[in-house]
């Protein structure tokens, strides 16, 4: 029983350490990618460095805590449109994944927005 309890405490400590490491600090920035609930169609495969970070469906979000620097993203690898994001410490950046034209002709794109646009997109998802 003591061994199980010790294992549980060790796992809990590890989990709390990981949560703490992922929290935004003064030396990091937060990037919030989101998709409006009004944007129809298939999920966008948000990618960076040829790695899929998230599949954004309408009304969903994905958050990243990052060190300051320059990062490159694509709303969907099928578009081949690269989005450059320069990040400074302490920032929270809101990025909307949407279409650059109407539903049938438009391609998934990324656009920097603001907290108000983000909150409105989330309110529409409810």
Image (cartoon, rainbow, N blue to C red):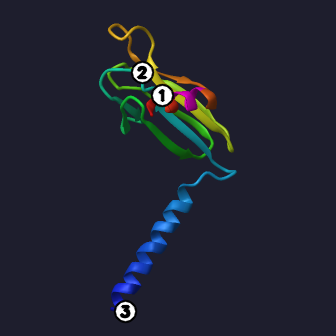
Q: In this view of the protein, can residue 87 be seen by the observer?
A: yes
* Highlighted range, magenta: 117-121
Q: Secondary structure at mark 2?
A: loop
Instruction: Give the labeled residue for mark 2.
Output: 38
Circle 3/circle 2 CB separation < 8 Å: no
Circle 1/circle 2 CB separation < 8 Å: yes
Tell me the residue at 51%/44% (across/down): 64
What is the x, y in percent for residue 7?
Answer: 37, 81
Res. 124 mark: 1
> Could you tell which of marks 1 and 2 lies nearer the N-terminus?
2
Instruction: Give the labeled residue for mark 3.
Output: 2
Q: On the image, which quarter does residue 86 sit in?
A: top right
What is the x, y in percent for residue 33?
Answer: 49, 34
> Could you tell which of marks 3 and 2 lies nearer the N-terminus?
3
Circle 1/circle 3 CB separation < 8 Å: no
> Could you tell which of marks 1 and 3 lies nearer the N-terminus?
3
Q: Is residue 119 magenta?
A: yes
Residue ranking furthest to the left: 42
> Callout 2 environment at 10 Å: few (<14), some (14 to 19), or many (20+)?
few
Q: Secondary structure at mark 3?
A: helix
Total numbered circles: 3
Task: Give the Cα separation between the discs numbered 1 and 2.
Answer: 8 Å
Q: Secondary structure at mark 1?
A: helix
């Amino acid at each position: 029983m003591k061994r199980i309890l010790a294992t549980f405490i060790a796992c809990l400590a590890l989990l709390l350490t990981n949560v703490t490491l992922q929290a935004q600090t003064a030396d990091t920035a937060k990037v919030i990618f989101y998709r409006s609930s009004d944007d129809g169609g298939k999920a966008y495969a948000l990618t960076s460095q040829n790695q899929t970070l998230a599949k954004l469906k309408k009304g969903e979000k994905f958050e990243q805590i990052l060190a300051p620097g320059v990062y490159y993203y694509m709303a969907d690898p099928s578009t081949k449109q690269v989005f450059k994001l320069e990040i400074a410490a302490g920032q929270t950046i809101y990025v909307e994944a949407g279409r650059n034209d109407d539903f049938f002709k438009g391609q998934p794109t990324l656009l920097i927005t603001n907290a108000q646009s983000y909150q409105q997109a989330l309110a529409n998802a409810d």
